[in-house]
Image (cartoon, rainbow, N blue to C red):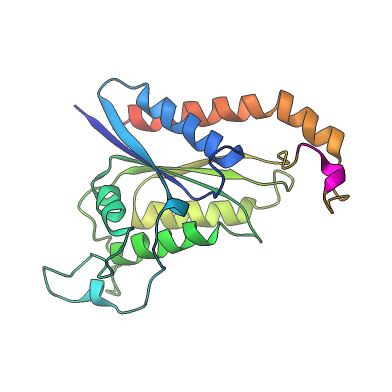
Amino acid sequence: MSVNVLAICGAANKGRNTAAMLKSAFDGAMSIPNASGEVVYLYDLAFRGCMGCHSCKLLDESKFARCAMKDDLSPVLEKAIAADVILIGSPIYFSDVTGETRSFLERFFFPGMTYNKDRTPTYPKRPVVGWVFTMNAPGEFYKDYFAALTAMTKHIIGEAEYVMAYQTQQFEDYSKYAATMFDEEMVKKRHIEQFPQDLEAAFKMGQRLAGVK
């Protein structure tokens, strides 16, 4: 049986920490026989967040559970609805995912739920979801946020889990930036010693999630 994998990168830089972690998770999923898929970079697309039109709540078969907006994100949403495994990667900006990631979630999550009392999810499939987070904060700093986002994902979309890389290296030369709050030597040491382990954890998560579908 084939496994359809969609990876969503919510980071602007395709060559840095988040993109590397997400690619590792995607490679892990692709290591499963019969897996196929693609990586989508949200910053390459022209789209906006939810407009609050509520078209996706209309009791009309042609509109129900589908975002009415038509832009570059529209085909990505259809791919997400059809996927067996969804991998989402984002750095943490101001205690949240990036704006592009948030806009994707609004457009993907909102049609996936109703205002009915039973709150039954609307999408026909229940994919497994793997979150990838990167941040320069300590490891436990955002644990409550990660738990809440994972729980919401689990309710609306499907079973979810996450991996993270923390206290990540942002600059090659910290002396060129207003960034004295960071311990440059510690961060660089972690990038050499810990980040490969974080990549391996992401790979294993992708492999595990694709293996259960």
Which residue is found at the position 57% from the left and 37% from the top?
Answer: 15
The residue under the point 48% across, 26% down is 204
Q: Position of residue 195 (x, y in %)?
A: 66, 29
Residue closest to the eye, 206 or 178: 178
- Quadrant location, the N terminus: top left
Q: Is residue 207 visible?
A: no
Extreme front residue here? Answer: 176
Label count reads 0
Residue name at image x 63 percent, y 50 percent:
143
Which picture quadrant has residue 67?
bottom left
Residue 81 image point, x, y percent? 26, 51
* Percent coordinates x, y for residue 42 in the rendering: 44, 52
Residue at image x 55%, y 57%? 98
Q: Residue 30 colored magenta?
A: no
What segment carries the magenta color?
172-176
In the rendered image, residue 26, in percent from the top left (x then y), is placed at 42, 32
Q: Is residue 157 left or right of residue 201?
A: left
